[in-house]
Image: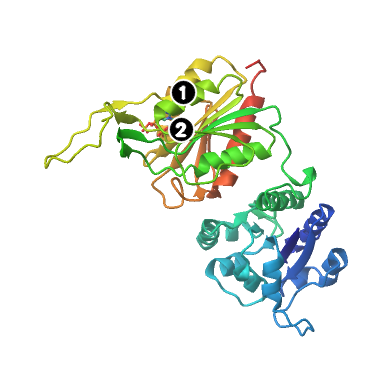
Amino acid sequence: MRIALGVTGCIAAYKSVEVLRGLQKRGASVTVVMTRHATEFVGPLTFQSISGFPVITEMFAPTHDPEIKHIQLAQSSDLLLVAPATANALAKFANGIADDFLSTLYISSTCPVLVAPAMNSEMWAHPATSENVRRLRERGVQFVDPEEGYLACKTVGAGRLAEPDTIVRRACEIIGLANGSNVAGDSCTRPADMSGERVLITAGPTQEAIDPVRFLSNRSSGKMGYALAEAAVERGAVVTLITGPVSIAPPKGARTIAVRSAAEMFNAVKDNLADSTLIVMAAAVADYRPADVHRQKMKKNGRAMVLDLEQTEDILASVARDIHEKASRIVVGFAAETESVIPNARKKLVEKHADLIVANDVSASDSGFDVDTNRIALVSSEGVTELPLLSKREAAEHIIDAALEIRRSRPLSTP
Ligand code: CTP
């Protein structure tokens, strides 16, 4: 695996040396690209000695190699990792400015991009930076968010570069995913902290037939549920995914059961519930279905048509009620809302007897249906945790972490 490691000009640049070593230990071949300001903090020779490759610091350095260097590097890299990334680097990436080697490499790259920002907390909180981060996330750039801590400017706040080990793990995770395998071995992925877990996930919409050619449905793409399945598989769980009709590929390593209607989904959930330890209901189940399904295609007759609808089973409420006494099982539901997101999610937590509700505002353009990002809040009896805009995969990891944490905080019992 080949990684281009971009280093930009901030005090945390010295930590990139550790990132480089971590990547190399896991077998990666790393080419380091430094911005001019980065070289003020750490000498290129340090990176060169460790990586064993020349460090790129200039856009137009004379060379005997006839290839155009940034294109060559962009095409041969499996990942572009930028750590640390300054506010300036984020602004350039977000706006397509290509005025040095690293920003030109970014705009020429088609491989996954992982960015670990580091800056003063005011700069990180500034609306310009937030907007740039949002735009980059929307384009699929992944982030290892900065941590809270003591900063070089002698203040305490969010902005400190994430730990090198965390950055290395995320980088390896992405490359393992991109190649469809764990390229660098076990040490490179998240810990298999879900081995022994049996996870049941619902995903996607349901379709409720009106007649042989028409149905009622909704805009769910299934992406959030599929991301949860992928994350759980990678963390060592045995995963059963019960999915409504979607147009995305089934996640590798999960047992996928395709259903169409809410009633079919309910039956499939009941059939597969027995030994599951974590149940995540991410499906956007239809709340109503036509009371009568016409056997033949309905014909228009020039008058208004009224459909008689009946309510479907609430799968989550039914499942959580039945297994509520079994304390080691965790039930996670979603709350797709367009207003009063948190109060509605709290209501669903109580009324549906869930252990955790993942609330999201599905009316926002970067969150909810059919986009790759999500802005979620985790609502449990312990309180509400609002998360920033994340890729659905990142959101999935947080949801799983929160569910496992609820389990850890409970007394043990057999499912
Ligand atoms: N859910 C379910 N069965 C249903 C409806 C919803 O299992 N018939 C689950 C969803 O999978 C989700 C949670 O319940 O985990 C909340 O779904 P949501 O659509 O947000 O809310 P509803 O319960 O349908 O309520 P409302 O439409 O009134 O918001």
Residue 356, numbered circle:
none
**Vertical comparison of 258 with 40: above or below:** above
Residue 325 sits in quarter: top right
* 162 or 230, nearer to the observer: 230
Q: Residue furthest toward the front?
A: 296
Q: Which residue is mark 2?
A: 259
Q: Which badge, 1 or 2, is on the more N-terminal residue? A: 2
Percent across and percent down for residue 11 are 74, 63
Q: CA distance from mark 1 to mark 2?
A: 10 Å
- Tally the numbered discs: 2
* 305 or 7, nearer to the observer: 305
**Vertical comparison of 358 with 13: above or below:** above
Q: Which residue is mark 1?
A: 267
**Vertical comparison of 102 with 292: above or below:** below
Q: Amino acid at mark 1?
A: Asn
Q: Secondary structure at mark 2?
A: loop
Percent across and percent down for residue 362 are 41, 44
Q: Are marks 1 and 2 in contact (CB under 8 Å)?
A: yes
Q: Secondary structure at mark 1?
A: helix
Q: Residue furthest toward the left?
A: 302
